[in-house]
Image: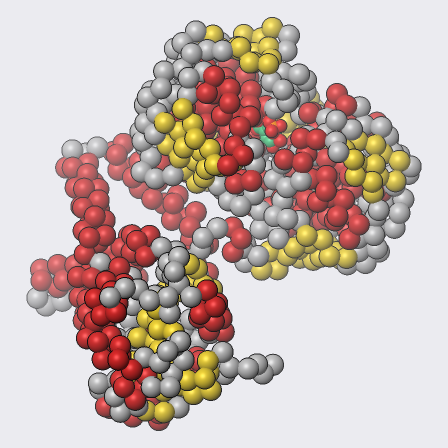
Amino acid sequence: MTRAPLFKRVAVIGLGLIGGSLASAIRRQGLATVVVGTDTRQDELALGVELGVIDEIAANVQDAVSGADLVVLAVPVRATRAVLEQIQPWLPEGALLTDVGSTKSSFVADVEAVFGQLPPNVIPGHPIAGSEKSGIRAANPDLFANHKVILTPDEHSDKAGLERLKGLWEGCGATVLTMSVEYHDEVLAATSHLPHLIAFSLVDTLAGEDENMDIFRYAAGGFRDFTRIAASDPVMWHDIFLSNREAVLRVIDHFTHDLDQLRTAIADQDSATLMRVFSRAKAAREHFSKMLSGQAYVTNNAEKQVTFRLQPGGSISGDIRVPGDKSMSHRSIMLGALADGVTEVQGFLEGEDSLATLQAFRDMGVTIEGPENGFVRIHGVGINGLQAPRGPLYLGNSGTAMRLFAGLLAAQAFDSELTGDESLSKRPMGRVADPLRAMGARIDTAEGGRPPLKIHGGQPLTGIHYEMPVASAQVKSCLLLAGLYAEGSTSVTEPAPTRDHTERMLAGFGYHVHRDGATASVVGGGSLTASNIDVPADISSAAFFLVAASIAPGSDLTLRHVGMNPTRVGVINILKQMGANIEVLNEREIGGEPVADLRVRSADLKGIDIPEDQVPLAIDEFPVLFVAAACAEGRTVLRGAEELRVKESDRIQVMADGLAAVGVETTVTPDGIIIDGGQPIVGGKVDSHGDHRIAMSFAVASLRAQGEIEVTDCANVATSFPGFVELARQTGIHISSEGVE
Ligand code: S3P
């Protein structure tokens, strides 16, 4: 496709690796009519034309800039001011000026020195791409493809110009982010400048110690990987460190302090500190490795695009165990961290939600080994042993983590901040912040009681009695956790039974929870004793297969070791009432939680009026129950389920839209839905709105579809069900997954 060039004449001042690569990318993509280059190094310039990097040579800056509508400064950072002085008198009215330097405060300071201010048409930029190679010979038009470019406009910047500049970088294959100058410099100091400094320093130290370079001869891959960037351009890095001096000094001090701490730990043979630091670092690296492998900078989950493609039909068979229970996995880490002693967890869910909880405790100084095949060992720090985290605790997609943490952190001596992804940032937190405030907590929320939560530490809490307006296990658990620290008794009454894992697990850790009908209470001031936990398979994940095997003809599937807590079995009760053939086998109790194996075979389902008392007991399973209803004979009516509208998505509306997209019309009501079963599922394209359970539900629907179903925005399936695609395929769903997970 040919498109009109975005710019008429782009002048690139400085034809090194970045300037040269940008010039050649602009030319290759037809983003400008003419690309003119200039450089003080005449030989590089000549090479520029010869290699096809630029169209024309300009003899000097004045010639380059005259008539240009975009000027890109790609000179070493410390040369910026002198070049700006040369450009300033000749810069045409309305032309945009940008740069590619690694430090942005210094660029803005140089512009202000030369222009008297930062003019609206000057927009600082920084492509996060490079190589240890330098010079125009290394110019590569693909250098920016799948890389980030950061632009740092301010409120006066020319909006139209900013859009054109974004378009230019996007045309070169990059993803453009905008942020403030200060934030850019802080982030880069930590993630780029410090690692380069350490690499230079390490190689220099070893080279100094080893005149004959023997160490290097024997050095293995680890050394090579770690020090690759020490071969980068010394002049460029000299300039960067001096230009971003303040931010770099701050992060060096931080690092020196931590390195010193490790030195002391080794000198003192302090295994606990070494294990804490190494296991936290390993986990953080693994957590980020997916992000790091794809692109240099990732801001949030929206970057991960995963699409499920499903071919129609199939039947379900096999003998499987789905991953561990999400609710119990969160709580096992929380209570294990606060206990005295070492807690070992089996069956931990290695999904992003529970990993976010695990990482947050590491950030508060708790040593946690694993997870490895569902095994986690937590070295509890005691109920008052948490340390202040260094930055905000990022909880991804997890509402459970955010609400339970709110209770726990409201009672700590330190301040904390809780943040999350786009979906979590829209979810109501007033339901926990309000009763916590009544206990004496100080919590700031964003508008409408949304995240982020800023929690002020050092507030003494007093127990309250709270009648919950909604049946929420998260609110109940939040208040009970705060209650561990509160003066006196904290009691919570629920309008309908909700999952009671917090109460059961607290009891397992030796903390008395009083139960009186619908009211649970704790008295503050006690302590927790470490206790091993066996997390059963998550009934909420099993639900997809319960429905799949029920609706697909010829199915026979066994699900092992499924958690059967009576506050969670709504999905089985509802499916059985619809006529499902589910056998509950081998019932047993493990670690205070009932567990069973489930055998499910195909059945002719019929529509029902879902009893309202089952709603809290099946709260997470409705998306897939809607699929069951669509495949049933007759009408299914759900009422009293308005809570579904504030889950990871508005699950009533998003399911109704998805069902309509595959050919099934429904009637949405404020607190539920009416589904007339038996309409053909013709197939089509469904937007899951980043909601894991919506995505998996439509994978199940494909079993009864007539045509292909495509489900977009599925990356969040990893929050609750890692390995879903493989397990679904293994049992008989014709699923493939495309994109970066
Ligand atoms: C959960 C409680 C439920 C549920 C969520 C997990 C928990 O939320 O939907 O997936 O672990 O306590 P609510 O308390 O908001 O109903």
In the displayed orientation, state which residue is furthest to the right: 634
Q: Is residue 286 visible?
A: yes
Give above or below for 197 relative to 341: below
Q: Quadrant of residue 73?
A: bottom left
Viewport quadrant of the N terminus:
bottom right
Residue 375: x %, y % from top left: 47, 34
Residue at 43%, 60% in the rendered image: 177
Name which quarter of the figure residue 525 lies in.
top left
Residue at image x 60%, y 56%?
306
In the image shown, does 65 or 228 lie closer to the viewer? 65
Does 676 sit left or right of 112 as displayed? Answer: right
On the image, the x and y values in percent for residue 227 come to 25, 62
User: The C terminus lies in which quarter of the figure?
Assistant: bottom right
Give the residue at x 31% y 41%.
278
In the foreground, 674 or 224: 674
Query: Eyeballing the image, is 643 above or below 300?
Result: above
245 vs 517: above or below: below
Tell me which residue sits at (67%, 40%) in the image: 650
What sort of colour scheme is used for the picture? Answer: secondary structure
Q: Quadrant of residue 338?
A: top left
Position of residue 717 in the picture relative to residue 408 (left or right) = right
Pick the front one: 107 or 319: 107
Q: How many numbered discs sit on the rendered protein?
A: 0
Q: Position of residue 182 (x, y in %)?
A: 30, 53
Which quarter holds ligand 1? top right
Left or right of residue 567: residue 141:
left
Which x, y percent locates residue 289? Answer: 42, 53
Q: Is there any visible trace of residue 45 in the rendered image?
A: no
